[in-house]
Amino acid sequence: MSITLAIVEDLDEVRDGLKNFISLSSDFKVLDTFKTAEEAVYDLPKLQPDIVIMDINLPGMNGIECVRQVKEKSPGTQFMMFTVYENDEKVFEALKAGASGYLLKNTGLVQLIESLKELYNGGSPMSANIARKLVMLFRKDQKETTTLDILSSRENEILQLLTKGLLYKEIANQLTISVATVRQHIHHIYEKLHVQNRTEAINKAFGKN
C-alpha cells in the first residue's frame, strides 16, 4: 500500500521537482499539490493524506498556521516542514502547531524520501542542526528548571528582584520584610546555587553563563 502525500509549496520548480521525484518511488502516491495555504486548508481535510510536505514562507497564510488549522480537521495527517528557516522561533512554532518533522531545503532528495518513511512509521525526522538546536534549548530549559526548583518561592521572588538591579533595602520595602531577612534569604540562595555574588547567582539560575 502506498503512503499518500500532498505538497504545499509556492515555488513551481520546487513543488514540481518534489512531486516528480517522489512519484518515482512506488512507496508513495502524491494526491495533490498546492501553491497556497488557503487552498490547502480547504482541500487537505477532504484528501486526508498520510503526510503533507509543508513550506513555511507562503503568500498569504503561512505554513505554520496552515498546519495548525488542518491538524484540527485531519488529526491523522503527519506534517513535514520543508523550509529554509532554521531559527528557534519558527521551529518551535511549527512543532507546537502539530508538525512532526522539520527538514531544511538543502536536504538531499534521497534523504527526504527516507525521512518521509521515518515520519510515516512514527519517527520525527529533523535536519541535524535543527535537532541540535532543540537539544541545546532543552538542556538550557532543563538547567533553568532544575536550578530554580531548589529555591523556595520567596528565594525565587528575591532572585527575580535581584535581576532587576534592586538594592537590599528596595527589595525589603517591596516585599515588606526587613533588610536582615533579605540578607538571610540571599545568603541561602548563594549557598544553594554554590555562588559567591549576585551576578553569579543570576547567571547560574537563568543560563546566561
Image (cartoon, rainbow, N blue to C red):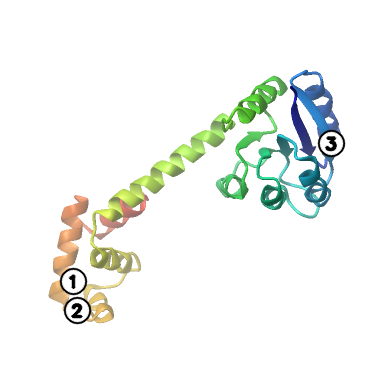
Q: Earlier in the sequence, mark 3 or mark 2?
A: 3
Q: Say which mark, if any, is on residue 177.
A: 2
The N terminus, quarter of image: top right
Q: Earlier in the sequence, mark 1 or mark 2?
A: 2
Pointers 1 and 2 in contact (C-beta within 8 Å) = yes
Q: Quadrant of residue 157 in the image?
A: bottom left
Q: Quadrant of residue 2 in the image?
A: top right
The mark lying in front, picked from 3 and 2, is 3
- Residue labelled with disc 3: 32
Amino acid at pointer 1: Val
Amino acid at pointer 3: Asp
Q: Say which mark, if any, is on residue 120.
A: none
C-alpha span from label 1 to label 3: 65 Å
Image spot of residue 48 (x, y percent) = 75, 40
Q: Is residue 154 above or below residue 118?
A: below
Q: Is residue 164 above or below residue 69?
A: below
Image spot of residue 86 (x, y percent) = 61, 41
- Residue labelled with disc 1: 182
Residue at screen point 80% across, 40% down:
47
**Residue 128 in the figure: left or right of residue 158:** right
Image spot of residue 102 (x, y percent) = 62, 36
C-alpha span from label 1 to label 2: 7 Å
Front residue of 89 and 33: 33
Q: Is residue 98 above or below residue 148?
A: above
Front residue of 40 and 84: 40
Image spot of residue 109 (x, y percent) = 72, 23
Q: Residues within 10 Å of mark 1 (few under 14, many from 20)?
A: many
Q: Is residue 209 visible?
A: no
Q: Residues within 10 Å of mark 2 (few under 14, many from 20)?
A: few
SS type, badge 2: loop
Amino acid at pointer 2: Ile
**Residue 206 in the figure: left or right of residue 2:** left
